[in-house]
Amino acid sequence: MNFTDGAPMNRRLSSLSVRRLDKLDDIEAEVEEAERTVEALHSFLGGGADRNRILAMARQVNGHLEKLQASELDAVVTGDLSSGKAAAKDLRKQLNARVEAARASVVALHEALTKPSAAAAPDRGYERHIPPGIRYNKERV
């Protein structure tokens, strides 16, 4: 949503507001790209793609989203704006929500890929470390 050449606002914006909204527009483009990547990773999951490669890409996207939110999105100050303050605050809030949703999706994907399957690891927990012949009380652990 470009505030400088469209008409979401009828009044003229200060140059500071225009710069901040342009920065948020740039961040929005990066968030959209990350969201597309997350969707693609989810689609690869069922297609038999290499698990390790999907995991690596998921970790990379999660790191990028975390950095984007911490160092760029949160760095856009809106308190000193007057003409574009409401628009900048709203857009920043929306972008933060989208980043959090994308990160939650990546975490869910990561957990789905790293969760051991029943066929690969039938025994879970401490059972695999107990020598044969020793009784194991599952209720005590």
Image (cartoon, grey):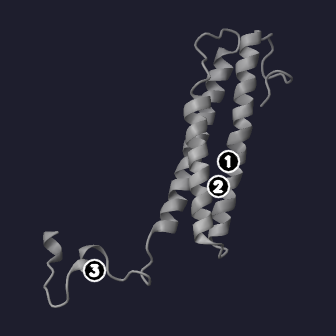
Residue found 44% across the figure and 84% down from its top: 119
Q: Which residue is mark 1?
A: 34
Give the position of the N terminus as an image quadrant: top right
Which amino acid, by three-letter code, is at mark 2?
A: Val
Cα–Cα gap, marks 2 and 1: 6 Å
Give yes or no for contact between labels 2 and 1 (Cβ–Cβ under 8 Å): yes
- Quadrant in which residue 131 is drawn: bottom left
Question: As drawn, is 1 to the left or to the right of 92?
Answer: right
* Secondary-structure class at tag 3: helix
Q: For this rendering, which residue is in front, 120 or 43?
A: 120
Measured along the vertical axis of the image, is residue 61 above or below residue 80? below
Q: Which residue is mark 3?
A: 128
- Judge the density around disc 3: few (<14), some (14-19), many (≥20) Cα neighbours within 10 Å: few
Residue found 57% across the figure and 62% down from its top: 55
- Judge the density around disc 1: few (<14), some (14-19), many (≥20) Cα neighbours within 10 Å: some
Residue 95 in the image: x percent, y percent? 63, 35
Residue found 67% across the figure and 65% down from its top: 43
Which amino acid, by three-letter code, is at mark 3?
A: Arg
Measured along the vertical axis of the image, is residue 53 above or below residue 69? below
Q: Which residue is mark 2?
A: 38
